Image: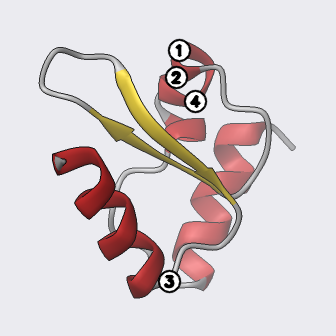
Amino acid sequence: MSKKKDVKKFKKKYLITYPVGLENGIAEALGAEGIPETFFIARDGRIAKKITNTVHYSDLAAAIEEILQ
């Protein structure tokens, strides 16, 4: 099965409605190395922060706070 089909199946199973980088080429463009990875993109288009692991609310809040400083 192709990656795109795998992603589509996974999204359907877990009711995911947001875009997933493996289905649209974004993962390759960002240099993603595994799953899960979360990228924070700055206004100028650079990767401001990358988290490799499951992201919880506290992780998101801390990353955003760090980026905004």
Question: Circle 3 sits on which residue?
Answer: 56
Look at the picture and state if 5 lies above or below 14. Answer: above
Question: Circle 2 sits on which residue?
Answer: 25
Give the structural element (helix, strand or loop) at label 3.
loop
The N terminus sits in image quarter: top right
Q: Position of residue 3 (x, y in %)?
A: 75, 39
Circle 1 packing at 10 Å, graded few (<14), some (14-19), many (20+), is: few
- State the residue at coordinates (16%, 15%): 44
What distance separates the C-alpha of mark 2 from that of mark 3?
A: 25 Å
Residue depth check, mark 4 versus mark 2: number of the one nearer the observer: 4
What distance separates the C-alpha of mark 3 from that of mark 1?
A: 24 Å
Question: Circle 4 sits on which residue?
Answer: 27
Give the structural element (helix, strand or loop) at label 4.
helix
Amino acid type indicated by mark 2: Gly
- State the residue at coordinates (78%, 33%): 33
Marks 4 & 1, CB-CB < 8 Å contact: yes
- State the residue at coordinates (71%, 64%): 53
Give the structural element (helix, strand or loop) at label 1.
helix
Residue depth check, mark 2 versus mark 3: number of the one nearer the observer: 3
Name the mark on residue 29: 1
Q: Position of residue 26 (x, y in %)?
A: 47, 26
Residue 66, picture quadrant: bottom left
What distance separates the C-alpha of mark 4 from that of mark 3?
A: 20 Å
